[in-house]
Amino acid sequence: MYVTLALDKQILSSKIVENRDNKYHSAFLISTIKEILKENDLTPQNLDVIGTNVGPGSFTGIRACTTVARMMAQQLDIQACGVSSLEILSKINKTDKPTAVILDARKNSGYLYLDNEIKGAVPIEQIKQQLNGKDYFIITDDKMQKEFGGISYQQEEYPLGEILAELIYNKVETKTSNWRELKPLYIQPPGIHTAAKAGV
């Protein structure tokens, strides 16, 4: 998880929060926000916009971040904006090549971002067909790197918080973003298993 504070497109603070002991990183979200504001002599009332990664990603982490962003925006009466993790990761590409982002979606498929568009959860064989013969800059996670090569964002630290802040600035400059519209991006529903009822 990353938490970033920016003013007029200048990054004031950016922190990466890892899982600690048995606690998931989202458990430290509120305390990290408070810590960054305090370090910069600010309060929540100084904020004008709050933005968050809406996924796809960790189900718990994305829900926690989206809920906190909605709550803060509602209480502070400020704009709230979401950006897909696929779009964030696409900005790692600093070359002139077109970007393909492929993240593990399980069920032998990948979340695909291609030609500046989220294509959804696509079967691996179909992704290979779409990439065939084209020179894309490929960004993956560790699992998908085995299938598609390219670079895995998990093997190096990238300034994802700073990228998110820049994308949020760009979005709110062109459109007012209401906290009511901020929702996690569920490209495919989570698997639900129900126990069979005896005698039915």
Image: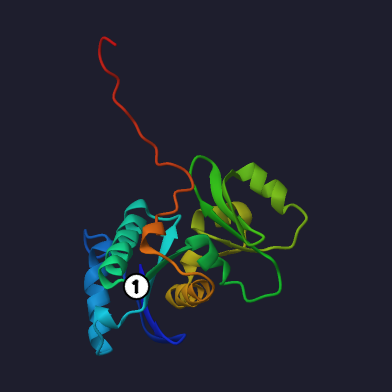
Whether residue 167 appears in this view of the structure is yes
Image quadrant in which you'd find residue 195? top left
Q: Residue beneath label 1, please?
A: 78
Name the image quarter holding the N terminus. Answer: bottom left
Residue 110 location (% of width, % of height): 55, 49
Residue depicted at x 25% and y 68% = 75
Residue nearer the viewer, 169 or 138 = 169
Residue 103 location (% of width, % of height): 52, 55
Residue nearer the viewer, 43 or 108 = 43
Residue 4 location (% of width, % of height): 37, 78
- Total residue callouts: 1
Residue 153, compared with residue 191, is above or below; it is below
Compared across the picture, whether 10 is left or right of 16 comes to right
Residue with the most extreme right position? 133
Compared across the picture, whether 103 is left or right of 132 comes to left
Residue 5, compared with residue 31, is above or below; it is below
Residue 49, compared with residue 56, is above or below; it is below
Residue depicted at x 51% and y 69% = 175
Residue 115 location (% of width, % of height): 67, 60
